[in-house]
Amino acid sequence: MFTTIRDLIKFSPSFRFGSLILLLVAVMIVLSFFSPYEAGKLRRKVKRNQPPSATFVFGTTSQGEDVFWSTTFAVRNTLTISLIAVTIGRGIGVMLGMLSGYFGGIFDRVAQSAVESFIVIPRLPLVILIASILRGSMTMYSLGILIGLFDWAHPSKRYRSQVLSLRERDFTHTAVFSGMSTVRIVIREHLPFIIPYMLADVISGFLFSIGFEVTLSYLGLADLDSPTVGTMIYWATYYQSVFAGRAWVIIVPIVTVVLMVLGFYLMSVGLGEYLDPRKRLVRLSADAGEEAQDDDPRKEKDDVWAP
Amino acid sequence: MNLLRTYILPRILQWALVIFVGISATFLIPRLSPRNPVDEMIGRMTAFASIDPHAVVSMRESATALFGLDGTLFDQYIRFWGRLLQGDLGVSFGNFPRKVSDIIAAGLPWSVGLLTTTIIISWTIGVFLGALAGYFHNRRWSQFLERFVVVVYPVPYLITALVLFIIFGAWLQIFPIMGGSRGEPALTWKYISTVLYFGFLPALSIVIGAIAFRFIMAKALTTTEIANDYVQYAELAAVPKRKIILFYVARNTMLPQVTDLALAFGAIFEGALITEILFAYPGLGFVLYNAIYNADYNIIMGIALLSIVGVATAMLIIDLLYPVLDPRVRLR
């Protein structure tokens, strides 16, 4: 595990940048626990509409919040929402995908047509419909659950195809013929392949959830009293910060979202390259300088042709 | 005949199933909620005036019938389908008694126009740039382009739109930030130019994200495609590079891109909704936004319904076009 992460940081620039950004995010989360303000009681604490200064690093909002400390809470809350969403969405997705991959038959066919239907249905209008009905009683946690319930179809499809390809590998047949029980095969032989794949998938799940949280909060459909990155943007536009010349109120959450998604995305790109064994070999065997040339597929071709 | 049985029929069945499931979901979701739209409407009407209790009772009865909320759930469901098949989506709560179908019909052309233009633009540019960058992947410009795309790609539509809104709409004030056009609708250049001018920023905000997605895919496809023997042969035979890229490589990468367009359609549609809300563009997104604020469930339901049918149908069309593009599917 640790050697893997070390290799990734050493050889994959995107993983390196991604983890650096996420480290920054983690620092923000840790800082939120040492905030001079209590969680949920940030409003009307400081002078309103102050530009960034030494006292208020990112300025203050029209509601008398210190933007810097709100951001620390916002990052924490947004990631909590995403964590709930990812746990639920991937939980359903992994279960369904693996079950339909292993069982096959009728179960697989029914599950697959449900998944196919769900993929086609545009999620945003439906989520907006539910969220607007629940408006007022929405909390951070129910928002996470709601997002999660709409993000299992794509993952389940991917896990199913993973399982299907693992089932056809030679080592599975060997294990079956040597009398290994199915449960043991799944746990001992298949999970080591699925877990790293899951890791990359979970990371990309965060991307989706963050985007959805921001969108729903911007529409005013989330719990607007708990600071998340999305609600910060909501209140910034609510108080017309762009037109009133208080750009810092809106720029800070925008930059935070961009950094968060970028961090997660770069990390998943790095992991994806690691999971593709051909690319991994190329990366790990080559020095940083030769990397670009070894990546050239035509170059590989030449080697095959060489006598 | 074989094609019909193995390719076309399953897709049409899937399409029907999706629409059935989606419409049933939009029927059920509001009814599972603890809120009662009839009570809320009567609450709004009686908020500022005292009304005779008998009148309230009969008002409640007529509103329940009007919203299709009388009878058992199953009765309601049957009637819901009956009305839906006649194109009746009920009346708007917020703009009572305007019909939901009229309100949606007013916004629809704007959304369809915005979507079609952005999809065509982003698909063409994405596939072309991706093929170029994949073919010349060692050049500095292609690496720079890829880095730029990697930064842009994961950013949510809303954020892209917001950044464009702030920079070009609010600060530089080059582009309008509200509305879809100026003046009387007519087929004159004067009117059409305002449509283009007002549509530029909303379209750009969708196009940026969509191009990034297309580009990443096109580049990956091109990198595997140029490993093929025919590319090497073409190079050895001194076929002009322009021809190799455009007519050999790019053409072969287009097929998976068409299938994927069907899958990505839903995402672009959602992006369009958000963009329209942000730029107050008079399409469906903006109608949806106002409906959220007025708690106008009938309109939200109507738009959810329409988007399910629309997206599923668009995907069906793209799927059915696929055999026309790929002879292998036809012959199988």
Image (cartoon, helix red, strand yellow):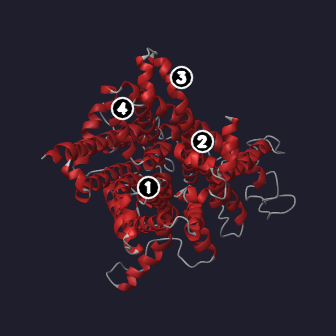
Badge 3, how many Cα within 10 Å: few under 14, some, many 20+?
Answer: few
Determine the chain carrying the residue at label 4. Answer: A
Give percent across and percent down for residue B70: 31, 36
Q: Are marks 4 and 3 on the same chain?
A: yes
Determine the chain carrying the residue at label 2. Answer: A
- Can you identify the residue that label 3 sits on? A188
Q: Which mark is residue A189?
A: none
Q: Are marks 1 and 4 on the same chain?
A: no
- Can you identify the residue that label 2 sits on? A82
Q: Which is in the foreground here, disc 2 or disc 3?
A: 3
Marked residue nearer the N-terminal end (4 or 2):
2
Which residue is more in the foreground, A23 or A289? A289
In whole angstroms, how far apart are the C-alphas of marks 4 and 2?
25 Å
Q: Mark yes or no: residue B290 visible.
A: no
- The kind of residue on which mark 1 rests is Thr
Give percent across and percent down for residue A182: 44, 18
Quadrant in the picture for residue A240: bottom right
Badge 4, how many Cα within 10 Å: few under 14, some, many 20+?
Answer: some
Say whether residue B119 is left or right of residue B158: left
Q: Which is in the foreground here, disc 3 or disc 1?
A: 1
